[in-house]
């Protein structure tokens, strides 16, 4: 009997490979925490000192029910959530659609959507957006009077392409635009700061043996 679709098994969880563009910090390894002082957090985001090990760490937060259930082990998964993980998972989708995601992380509230268009056997194209609201805080003077407020939000836009390149191998490409925005209102030290960066993900997926429910994935 021919088997199709995504199947979660211990072998898949063990063999799904995931390579991240940014190395998580020690604090992230202990789990994301909402900062007690958002002013200190915002200052850390827009520091003048460059970092080679941290950047856009909010991209590591899971989005979508499958990504949360599998604890981000999504490199070998297929379906519309692949736009945020391994775009090769879009290659064999039958029928597109519009998908909305909503999550409440310790770091903040996340809202996202994806529009996926498919045309087989050519492949699939996806356009996605995610907003992570990290919250805000009032600014007070020495007399405890409110003089302003600020908020921190992360924006992510993704264009995804997935296609089948061999009989049992799919490939995909993601182009990402990530922006952290610090907005201040009232009496502020500055009018706000915005940092923008770009990223490119390339991924492959393979099912070596058709009759065995084992799917391998690699993301670079």
Image: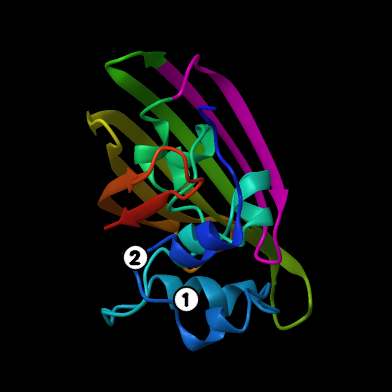
| Mark closest to the chain's N terminus, 1 or 2 | 2
The majority secondary structure of the magenta stretch comes to: strand
Image quadrant containing the N terminus: top right
The residue that mark 2 highlights is 19
Residue drawn at (36%, 65%) of the image: 20
- The picture places residue 150, in percent across and down from the top left corner, at 61, 60
Mark 2, secondary structure of its residue: loop
Query: As displayed, is residue 86 above or below residue 210?
Result: below
Query: As displayed, is residue 2 above or below residue 75?
Result: above
Towards the viewer: 185 or 5: 5
Identify the image quadrant of residue 161.
top left
Q: Real-space Cα distance between discs 1 and 2?
A: 29 Å
- The picture places residue 104, in percent across and down from the top left corner, at 74, 54
Residue drawn at (51%, 34%) of the image: 79
Q: Which residues are magenta?
A: 93-117
- The picture places residue 72, in percent across and down from the top left corner, at 55, 59
Towards the viewer: 94 or 183: 94
The residue that mark 1 highlights is 43
Residue 208 appears left or right of 32 = left
Disc assigned to residue 70: none
Towards the viewer: 78 or 32: 78
**Is residue 165 highlighted in magenta?**
no
């Amino acid at each position: 009997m021919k088997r199709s679709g995504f199947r979660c098994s211990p072998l898949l969880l063990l063999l799904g490979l995931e390579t991240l563009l940014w190395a998580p910090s020690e604090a992230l390894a202990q789990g994301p925490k909402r900062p007690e002082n958002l002013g200190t957090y915002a200052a850390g985001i827009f520091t003048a000192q460059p970092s080679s090990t941290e950047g856009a760490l909010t991209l590591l937060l899971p989005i979508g029910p499958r990504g949360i259930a599998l604890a981000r082990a999504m490199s070998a998964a297929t379906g519309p959530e692949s736009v945020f993980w391994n775009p090769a998972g879009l290659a064999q989708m039958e029928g597109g659609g519009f998908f909305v995601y909503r999550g409440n992380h310790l770091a903040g509230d996340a809202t996202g959507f994806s529009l996926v268009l498919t045309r087989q056997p050519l492949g699939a194209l996806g356009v996605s957006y995610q907003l992570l609201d990290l919250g805000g805080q009032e600014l007070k003077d020495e007399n405890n009077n409110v003089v302003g407020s600020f908020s921190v939000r992360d924006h992510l836009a993704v264009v995804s392409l997935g296609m089948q390149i061999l009989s049992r191998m799919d490939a995909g490409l993601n182009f990402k635009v990530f922006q952290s925005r610090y907005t201040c209102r009232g009496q502020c030290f500055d009018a706000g700061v915005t940092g923008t960066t770009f990223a490119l993900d390339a991924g492959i997926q393979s099912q070596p043996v058709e009759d065995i429910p084992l799917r391998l994935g690699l993301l670079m």
